[in-house]
Image (spheres, helix red, strand yellow):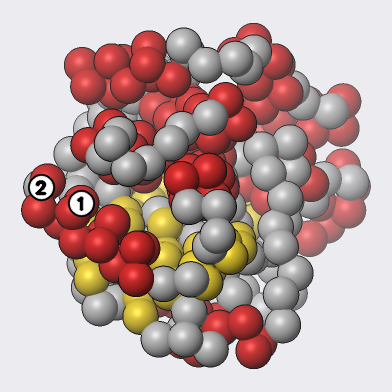
Amino acid sequence: MKNIQAEVLNIINEYSTIIIHRHIFPDPDALGSQCGLKNIIKESFPHKNVYVVGEEVEELKFICRMDDIPDHIYKDALVIVCDTANLLRISDKRYTLGSYIIKIDHHPNCEPYGDLAWVDPSYSSTSEMIMDLFLSNKDTMTLNAEAARMLYTGIVGDTGRFLYRGTTVQTMEYTAELMKYDFDPQQIYSTLYRKKRNTAKLQGTLLLNYEQTSNGVAYFKITQQILNEFNVDRITASNLINTLADIEGNKVWALFVEYPEYIRVRISSAGTVINHIASRFNGGGHPLASGATVYSWQEADDLIRALEKTCH
């Protein structure tokens, strides 16, 4: 593992311009790893030009903001893609314009890409991987409080506040190391998990009206009409997925959110492996937490039936 980290650092050293991408529909880990890595590189190598790109999510802007760069910046640039399992999910398709691509990810490597890939599902999060990269290269890399705050937020997000199975002894050790820096963890928690009144009302509707199959697949379909009724944006709606996590009898839970041209699906599980089902429906991810995309409500029902067979 240390060899691949050394390779990543060697490539970073070779480039004066570095552009860091992550996946669409960003979550705290995508942003925390992306922006934490930018901050570490800038702090360690002040002469380098380092940028982060991709769409922004209103409620996650407190983690970091994206850079707006023209296409020509990509010429002879290093592109690093964080927390993104497959090419289809990379935010900002200009990643192809760079001269070299590094993939850093903790999802199963179902779709290898890039010139160099550091992929290891044993980490709780890609933010933990970035922390490991720093700790393995403390002689040449520098971590400041802002980078620590970002990486901490990413780890908290992908471990569900350290409740998910991916949380390890190393995760806690690295988190303790991050907490030595000057930032406010309580402020992160209160900002990350605060809900607006209309979002809370949608969550209540979800709890009152979700459906469950005979084999324990719980699901709820958030149509455009529901989004309009509660005035909730799609990403905020998608983040309600774990509302169904702690209900007795729910083995797998799925949340469908309607977009103009497709339906985004988030799927989680209490133990049943579901990422192979997600991959059949234009997605993928972790064994117990994945995403998918379908293009009609009929296809959504097909996905539900596939999950139902998996739980049987």
Disc on res. 5: 1
Give left or right: position of 121 versus 74.
left
Position of residue 243 measured from the top left corner of the image (x, y, whole percent): 56, 28
Q: Quadrant of residue 253?
A: top left
Residue at numbered disc 2: 1
Give left or right: position of 184 versus 174.
right
| Labelled pair 1, 2 in contact (Cβ < 8 Å) | yes
Residue toward you, 269 or 34:
34
Give left or right: position of 309 versus 12.
left
Position of residue 119 measured from the top left corner of the image (x, y, whole percent): 22, 56
- What residue is at 73 percent from the left and 36 percent from the top? 62
Q: Amino acid at mark 1?
A: Gln
Query: Vertically, is 81 above or below 174?
Result: below
- What residue is at 74 percent from the left and 43 percent from the top? 61
Kind of element beneath mark 1: helix
- What residue is at 55 percent from the left and 60 percent from the top? 47
Residue toward you, 69 or 16:
16
Query: Vertically, is 144 above or below 85?
Result: above
Q: Amino acid at mark 2?
A: Met
Query: Vertically, is 238 above or below 143?
Result: below
